[in-house]
Image (cartoon, rainbow, N blue to C red):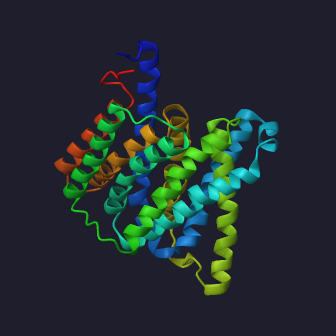
Amino acid sequence: MTAISPTTRRPLLLANLICLASMVVWAAGLPAADLILPHMPPVALTAGRATLAAMVLVPLWWLIEGRRAILQADWLTGAWIGFVTLGLGSFFIVLALHYNDAVTVAIVTAVMPVIGILLECIADKRPFTRALAVGLVLSVGGGVIAVGGAGGRMDFGVGILAALVSTLCYTWGSRETVRALPHLTPLGRCSVTITGCAAIALAAAAGDGLIRGQWPDWQAIGPAEFAGLAVFGIGSLAISQLLWIVVVGRLGIGAASMHSNATPFYTMVIVFLLGGIWNWWQTLGAAIVVLGALIAQGLLIRESR
Protein backbone atom coordinates (compact mmCIF):
# COMPACT_ATOMS: atom_id res chain seq x y z
CA MET A 1 0.00 0.00 0.00
CA THR A 2 1.10 3.57 -0.59
CA ALA A 3 0.24 6.65 1.40
CA ILE A 4 0.74 10.34 0.76
CA SER A 5 3.48 11.81 2.95
CA PRO A 6 2.77 14.90 5.10
CA THR A 7 5.08 17.00 2.91
CA THR A 8 2.99 16.05 -0.14
CA ARG A 9 -0.35 16.23 1.66
CA ARG A 10 0.00 19.89 2.66
CA PRO A 11 0.53 21.23 -0.89
CA LEU A 12 -2.38 19.10 -2.11
CA LEU A 13 -4.70 20.42 0.59
CA LEU A 14 -3.60 23.98 -0.22
CA ALA A 15 -4.30 23.39 -3.91
CA ASN A 16 -7.78 22.13 -3.03
CA LEU A 17 -8.44 25.25 -0.95
CA ILE A 18 -7.32 27.43 -3.88
CA CYS A 19 -9.64 25.47 -6.16
CA LEU A 20 -12.51 26.00 -3.73
CA ALA A 21 -11.79 29.74 -3.74
CA SER A 22 -11.77 29.75 -7.54
CA MET A 23 -15.19 28.09 -7.63
CA VAL A 24 -16.62 30.53 -5.08
CA VAL A 25 -15.40 33.55 -7.05
CA TRP A 26 -16.70 32.05 -10.30
CA ALA A 27 -20.09 31.34 -8.71
CA ALA A 28 -20.35 34.95 -7.55
CA GLY A 29 -20.28 36.06 -11.16
CA LEU A 30 -23.46 34.18 -12.09
CA PRO A 31 -25.91 36.25 -9.99
CA ALA A 32 -23.94 39.39 -10.89
CA ALA A 33 -24.35 38.60 -14.57
CA ASP A 34 -28.12 38.86 -14.17
CA LEU A 35 -27.70 42.62 -13.74
CA ILE A 36 -26.07 43.15 -17.14
CA LEU A 37 -27.55 40.28 -19.21
CA PRO A 38 -30.74 42.12 -20.27
CA HIS A 39 -28.75 45.04 -21.67
CA MET A 40 -25.91 43.38 -23.61
CA PRO A 41 -26.09 40.74 -26.39
CA PRO A 42 -24.10 37.54 -25.69
CA VAL A 43 -21.21 38.37 -28.06
CA ALA A 44 -20.86 41.91 -26.72
CA LEU A 45 -21.03 40.70 -23.12
CA THR A 46 -18.34 38.09 -23.82
CA ALA A 47 -16.12 40.81 -25.31
CA GLY A 48 -16.74 43.23 -22.45
CA ARG A 49 -16.11 40.59 -19.82
CA ALA A 50 -12.82 39.42 -21.37
CA THR A 51 -11.64 42.99 -22.00
CA LEU A 52 -12.14 43.99 -18.38
CA ALA A 53 -10.27 40.89 -17.23
CA ALA A 54 -7.37 41.56 -19.63
CA MET A 55 -7.14 45.19 -18.48
CA VAL A 56 -6.49 43.91 -14.96
CA LEU A 57 -4.23 40.93 -15.69
CA VAL A 58 -1.82 42.31 -18.31
CA PRO A 59 -0.66 45.36 -16.27
CA LEU A 60 -0.32 43.09 -13.24
CA TRP A 61 1.76 40.65 -15.30
CA TRP A 62 3.95 43.53 -16.54
CA LEU A 63 4.55 44.80 -12.99
CA ILE A 64 5.41 41.37 -11.56
CA GLU A 65 7.37 39.70 -14.37
CA GLY A 66 8.50 42.58 -16.60
CA ARG A 67 8.28 43.43 -20.29
CA ARG A 68 10.49 40.55 -21.47
CA ALA A 69 8.04 37.92 -20.24
CA ILE A 70 5.24 39.60 -22.18
CA LEU A 71 7.24 39.96 -25.41
CA GLN A 72 8.53 36.37 -25.35
CA ALA A 73 5.12 34.78 -24.75
CA ASP A 74 3.52 32.58 -27.42
CA TRP A 75 0.64 34.92 -28.16
CA LEU A 76 -0.66 33.00 -31.18
CA THR A 77 -1.11 29.77 -29.24
CA GLY A 78 -2.52 31.69 -26.30
CA ALA A 79 -5.04 33.48 -28.52
CA TRP A 80 -6.27 30.18 -29.97
CA ILE A 81 -6.63 28.53 -26.57
CA GLY A 82 -8.26 31.65 -25.15
CA PHE A 83 -10.74 31.76 -28.03
CA VAL A 84 -11.88 28.17 -27.38
CA THR A 85 -11.67 28.20 -23.58
CA LEU A 86 -12.90 31.66 -22.71
CA GLY A 87 -14.33 33.00 -25.97
CA LEU A 88 -16.57 30.11 -26.98
CA GLY A 89 -16.88 28.99 -23.36
CA SER A 90 -18.03 32.43 -22.19
CA PHE A 91 -20.31 32.95 -25.19
CA PHE A 92 -22.14 29.69 -24.56
CA ILE A 93 -22.38 30.30 -20.80
CA VAL A 94 -23.90 33.73 -21.49
CA LEU A 95 -26.29 32.10 -23.96
CA ALA A 96 -27.20 29.52 -21.31
CA LEU A 97 -27.90 32.27 -18.78
CA HIS A 98 -30.30 33.87 -21.25
CA TYR A 99 -32.44 30.71 -21.18
CA ASN A 100 -31.89 29.40 -17.63
CA ASP A 101 -31.36 30.69 -14.10
CA ALA A 102 -27.88 30.87 -12.57
CA VAL A 103 -28.30 27.83 -10.30
CA THR A 104 -29.46 25.57 -13.15
CA VAL A 105 -26.52 26.67 -15.32
CA ALA A 106 -24.15 25.91 -12.46
CA ILE A 107 -25.70 22.45 -12.10
CA VAL A 108 -24.85 21.52 -15.71
CA THR A 109 -21.15 21.73 -14.85
CA ALA A 110 -21.64 18.39 -13.05
CA VAL A 111 -20.38 16.75 -16.26
CA MET A 112 -17.04 18.55 -16.02
CA PRO A 113 -15.22 15.89 -13.94
CA VAL A 114 -16.28 13.20 -16.40
CA ILE A 115 -14.88 15.20 -19.31
CA GLY A 116 -11.69 16.06 -17.40
CA ILE A 117 -10.97 12.49 -16.34
CA LEU A 118 -11.69 11.14 -19.82
CA LEU A 119 -9.21 13.65 -21.24
CA GLU A 120 -6.52 12.54 -18.81
CA CYS A 121 -7.16 8.84 -19.30
CA ILE A 122 -7.19 9.09 -23.11
CA ALA A 123 -4.60 11.80 -23.80
CA ASP A 124 -2.28 11.37 -20.80
CA LYS A 125 -2.73 7.59 -20.33
CA ARG A 126 -3.71 8.16 -16.72
CA PRO A 127 -4.64 4.87 -14.95
CA PHE A 128 -8.23 4.67 -13.80
CA THR A 129 -7.63 3.78 -10.14
CA ARG A 130 -10.03 2.74 -7.41
CA ALA A 131 -9.70 6.12 -5.67
CA LEU A 132 -10.39 7.93 -8.94
CA ALA A 133 -13.50 5.81 -9.56
CA VAL A 134 -14.85 6.41 -6.05
CA GLY A 135 -14.13 10.12 -6.27
CA LEU A 136 -15.82 10.43 -9.65
CA VAL A 137 -18.95 8.61 -8.46
CA LEU A 138 -19.18 10.83 -5.37
CA SER A 139 -18.57 13.97 -7.41
CA VAL A 140 -21.28 13.19 -9.95
CA GLY A 141 -23.57 11.90 -7.18
CA GLY A 142 -23.16 15.15 -5.27
CA GLY A 143 -24.02 17.06 -8.43
CA VAL A 144 -27.18 14.98 -8.88
CA ILE A 145 -28.22 15.70 -5.28
CA ALA A 146 -27.64 19.39 -5.94
CA VAL A 147 -29.85 19.13 -9.03
CA GLY A 148 -32.74 17.80 -6.98
CA GLY A 149 -32.11 20.27 -4.19
CA ALA A 150 -32.06 23.27 -6.49
CA GLY A 151 -35.14 22.15 -8.35
CA GLY A 152 -33.12 22.36 -11.55
CA ARG A 153 -34.66 20.73 -14.60
CA MET A 154 -32.41 18.93 -17.05
CA ASP A 155 -34.54 19.75 -20.10
CA PHE A 156 -32.23 19.51 -23.07
CA GLY A 157 -33.20 22.79 -24.67
CA VAL A 158 -30.97 25.53 -26.03
CA GLY A 159 -29.88 26.72 -22.59
CA ILE A 160 -28.80 23.32 -21.28
CA LEU A 161 -27.08 22.43 -24.57
CA ALA A 162 -25.20 25.75 -24.51
CA ALA A 163 -24.05 25.11 -20.93
CA LEU A 164 -22.79 21.64 -21.91
CA VAL A 165 -20.81 23.02 -24.88
CA SER A 166 -19.37 25.73 -22.63
CA THR A 167 -18.23 23.11 -20.11
CA LEU A 168 -16.58 21.03 -22.83
CA CYS A 169 -14.70 24.05 -24.23
CA TYR A 170 -13.60 25.18 -20.80
CA THR A 171 -12.41 21.75 -19.65
CA TRP A 172 -10.36 21.12 -22.80
CA GLY A 173 -8.94 24.64 -22.82
CA SER A 174 -7.95 24.57 -19.15
CA ARG A 175 -5.85 21.46 -19.68
CA GLU A 176 -4.42 22.88 -22.91
CA THR A 177 -3.47 26.17 -21.22
CA VAL A 178 -1.14 24.29 -18.87
CA ARG A 179 0.10 21.79 -21.47
CA ALA A 180 0.73 24.14 -24.42
CA LEU A 181 2.21 27.06 -22.44
CA PRO A 182 4.61 25.27 -20.06
CA HIS A 183 7.19 28.06 -19.87
CA LEU A 184 4.74 30.69 -18.61
CA THR A 185 3.68 31.24 -15.02
CA PRO A 186 -0.03 30.88 -14.18
CA LEU A 187 -0.34 34.68 -14.34
CA GLY A 188 1.26 34.69 -17.80
CA ARG A 189 -0.93 31.85 -19.04
CA CYS A 190 -4.10 33.60 -17.90
CA SER A 191 -3.02 36.96 -19.29
CA VAL A 192 -2.17 35.55 -22.73
CA THR A 193 -5.31 33.46 -23.11
CA ILE A 194 -7.71 36.08 -21.78
CA THR A 195 -6.15 38.86 -23.88
CA GLY A 196 -6.34 36.67 -26.99
CA CYS A 197 -9.96 35.92 -26.19
CA ALA A 198 -10.70 39.64 -25.72
CA ALA A 199 -9.18 40.59 -29.07
CA ILE A 200 -11.17 37.98 -30.99
CA ALA A 201 -14.37 38.67 -29.05
CA LEU A 202 -14.14 42.44 -29.66
CA ALA A 203 -13.84 41.82 -33.40
CA ALA A 204 -16.78 39.43 -33.29
CA ALA A 205 -18.86 41.89 -31.25
CA ALA A 206 -18.15 44.70 -33.73
CA GLY A 207 -19.18 42.43 -36.60
CA ASP A 208 -22.32 41.37 -34.73
CA GLY A 209 -23.22 45.00 -34.21
CA LEU A 210 -22.56 46.11 -37.78
CA ILE A 211 -24.25 43.11 -39.45
CA ARG A 212 -27.15 42.36 -37.12
CA GLY A 213 -27.38 45.61 -35.15
CA GLN A 214 -26.70 43.76 -31.88
CA TRP A 215 -25.29 46.61 -29.79
CA PRO A 216 -25.46 47.04 -26.01
CA ASP A 217 -28.26 49.22 -24.68
CA TRP A 218 -25.88 51.84 -23.30
CA GLN A 219 -28.67 54.07 -21.97
CA ALA A 220 -29.91 51.30 -19.68
CA ILE A 221 -26.45 50.55 -18.25
CA GLY A 222 -25.91 52.43 -15.00
CA PRO A 223 -23.62 51.98 -11.98
CA ALA A 224 -25.39 48.80 -10.81
CA GLU A 225 -25.18 47.16 -14.24
CA PHE A 226 -21.54 48.14 -14.66
CA ALA A 227 -20.79 46.73 -11.19
CA GLY A 228 -22.38 43.46 -12.28
CA LEU A 229 -20.20 43.44 -15.41
CA ALA A 230 -17.11 44.16 -13.29
CA VAL A 231 -17.83 41.23 -10.96
CA PHE A 232 -18.61 38.98 -13.94
CA GLY A 233 -15.41 40.00 -15.74
CA ILE A 234 -12.75 40.87 -13.18
CA GLY A 235 -13.91 38.52 -10.43
CA SER A 236 -15.55 35.59 -12.18
CA LEU A 237 -13.05 35.56 -15.05
CA ALA A 238 -9.73 37.23 -14.19
CA ILE A 239 -9.36 36.20 -10.54
CA SER A 240 -11.20 32.89 -10.81
CA GLN A 241 -9.29 31.85 -13.94
CA LEU A 242 -5.92 32.72 -12.38
CA LEU A 243 -6.66 30.59 -9.32
CA TRP A 244 -8.03 27.83 -11.53
CA ILE A 245 -4.93 27.59 -13.75
CA VAL A 246 -2.74 27.43 -10.63
CA VAL A 247 -4.76 24.43 -9.44
CA VAL A 248 -4.92 22.65 -12.82
CA GLY A 249 -1.13 22.86 -12.97
CA ARG A 250 -0.88 21.20 -9.55
CA LEU A 251 -3.74 18.70 -9.48
CA GLY A 252 -4.55 18.07 -13.14
CA ILE A 253 -7.83 18.83 -14.88
CA GLY A 254 -9.55 15.65 -13.63
CA ALA A 255 -9.18 16.23 -9.89
CA ALA A 256 -9.58 20.00 -10.17
CA SER A 257 -12.79 19.72 -12.18
CA MET A 258 -14.44 17.65 -9.43
CA HIS A 259 -14.71 20.82 -7.38
CA SER A 260 -16.94 22.35 -10.05
CA ASN A 261 -19.81 20.16 -8.86
CA ALA A 262 -19.97 22.16 -5.62
CA THR A 263 -20.62 25.35 -7.59
CA PRO A 264 -24.44 25.14 -7.19
CA PHE A 265 -23.91 25.23 -3.42
CA TYR A 266 -21.67 28.30 -3.63
CA THR A 267 -24.17 29.97 -5.94
CA MET A 268 -26.94 29.18 -3.49
CA VAL A 269 -24.92 30.65 -0.60
CA ILE A 270 -24.44 33.89 -2.54
CA VAL A 271 -28.12 34.03 -3.49
CA PHE A 272 -28.97 33.34 0.19
CA LEU A 273 -26.80 36.28 1.29
CA LEU A 274 -28.70 38.43 -1.21
CA GLY A 275 -32.03 37.44 0.32
CA GLY A 276 -32.71 33.95 -1.05
CA ILE A 277 -33.44 30.77 0.88
CA TRP A 278 -31.02 28.17 2.30
CA ASN A 279 -31.10 24.71 0.70
CA TRP A 280 -29.80 21.77 2.76
CA TRP A 281 -29.85 19.41 -0.23
CA GLN A 282 -27.32 21.60 -2.03
CA THR A 283 -25.27 21.75 1.16
CA LEU A 284 -25.20 17.94 1.30
CA GLY A 285 -24.35 17.74 -2.41
CA ALA A 286 -21.42 20.13 -1.99
CA ALA A 287 -20.03 18.15 0.94
CA ILE A 288 -20.18 14.92 -1.09
CA VAL A 289 -18.45 16.63 -4.04
CA VAL A 290 -15.57 17.88 -1.91
CA LEU A 291 -15.27 14.44 -0.28
CA GLY A 292 -15.05 12.84 -3.72
CA ALA A 293 -12.37 15.27 -4.88
CA LEU A 294 -10.22 14.51 -1.83
CA ILE A 295 -10.63 10.74 -2.23
CA ALA A 296 -9.72 10.89 -5.94
CA GLN A 297 -6.40 12.52 -5.03
CA GLY A 298 -5.60 9.84 -2.45
CA LEU A 299 -5.93 12.23 0.49
CA LEU A 300 -8.49 10.12 2.37
CA ILE A 301 -7.86 6.54 1.24
CA ARG A 302 -4.64 4.75 0.35
CA GLU A 303 -4.17 3.36 -3.13
CA SER A 304 -2.76 -0.04 -4.08
CA ARG A 305 0.28 -0.06 -6.34
Q: Is residue 91 left or right of residue 65?
A: left
Residue extending furthest toward the bottom: 212
Q: Quadrant of residue 275?
A: bottom left
Q: Residue at x 53, y 60 (%)?
A: 89
Whether residue 226 is visible: yes
Q: Is residue 180 left or right of residue 128?
A: right
Residue extending furthest toward the top: 6
Q: Is residue 115 left or right of residue 237?
A: left
Q: Position of residue 144 (x, y in %)?
A: 25, 53
Q: Position of residue 68 (x, y in %)?
A: 82, 37
The correct choice, above or below, for 13 with respect to 187 in the image is: above
Q: Quadrant of residue 67?
A: top right
Q: Residue at x 33, y 42 (%)?
A: 136
Residue extending furthest toward the left: 280
Q: Residue 290 or 138: which is nearer the viewer?
A: 138
The correct choice, above or below, for 160 with respect to 294 in the image is: below
Q: Quadrant of the C terminus?
A: top left
Q: Is residue 216 left or right of residue 274?
A: right
Q: Position of residue 141 (x, y in %)?
A: 25, 47
Q: Residue at x 38, y 42 (%)?
A: 259
Q: Quadrant of the N terminus?
A: top left
Whether residue 276 is visible: no
